[in-house]
Amino acid sequence: MWYRGRVHLAPAVIPAHATVTGAIDTPGDVTLEGRLEGELRAGGAVTVAANATCMASVFARSLVIYGELIGNAVCTETIRVAAGARAVGDLRAPDVEVDSASEVDGRVDLLPPEPRSPELTRLEASRRGPALPKPRTIPRAPRPVGRVRIGTKRKP
């Protein structure tokens, strides 16, 4: 049986009291409740829970920080640093929201939004080939020669 449509992946969860060292690359969402050291690449949303520590570079669609992020984060949509969260490193996204009760030590860069792919349009094709006659062109009227003055009076 084939499934036609969008496949929804369950979010990857790194549980509390677990430590992951290395690189994580996933097409879906990631929820970090434990500790991560390395690099995290996600095609979806990344959530750093309240008691979690992420010592990694994060590349994702969106990022929400409730705990602690030590490293740079680059997102294609949004980054949100919630109240009580701590971020040490550069945050880069088109939309960055930092709560006043949070701590950010690093640069916050607003990126231009990602360009959307243009929609496909249908073009009308003309039927021409060796068997079809060339379309006739309508001849243009000849251009006037010399000066043409409209609405001006000549002085005698």
Image (cartoon, rainbow, N blue to C red):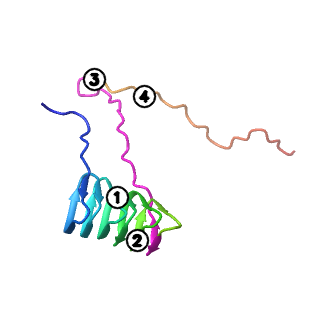
Going 61% across and 40% down the picture, which residue do you hit? 145
What's the distance in space between the residues labelled 3 and 2, CA to CA? 69 Å
What's the distance in space between the residues labelled 4 and 3, CA to CA? 15 Å
Residue 3 as seen in the image, left or right of residue 50: left
Mark 4 and mark 2 residues within 8 Å of each other at the beta carbon: no
Task: Choose top left, top right, bottom left or bottom right for residue 45.
Answer: bottom left
Mark 1 and mark 3 residues within 8 Å of each other at the beta carbon: no
What's the distance in space between the residues labelled 1 and 2, CA to CA? 13 Å
Residue 137 as seen in the image, left or right of residue 29: right
Label 3 element class: loop
Label 1 element class: strand
Residue 131 lies within the magenta run: yes
Please name the predominant secondary structure of the magenta segment in the image: loop
Q: Which residue is mark 2?
A: 87
Residue 99 lies within the magenta run: no
Label 2 element class: strand
What's the distance in space between the residues labelled 4 and 1, CA to CA? 65 Å
Task: Choose top left, top right, bottom left or bottom right for residue 105.
Answer: bottom left
Indicate which disc, 1 or 3, sits on the residue closer to the N terminus.
1
- Single out the mark in the foreground, 3 or 2: 2
Going 82% across and 43% down the picture, which residue do you hit? 154
Which label number is shown at residue 137? Answer: 4
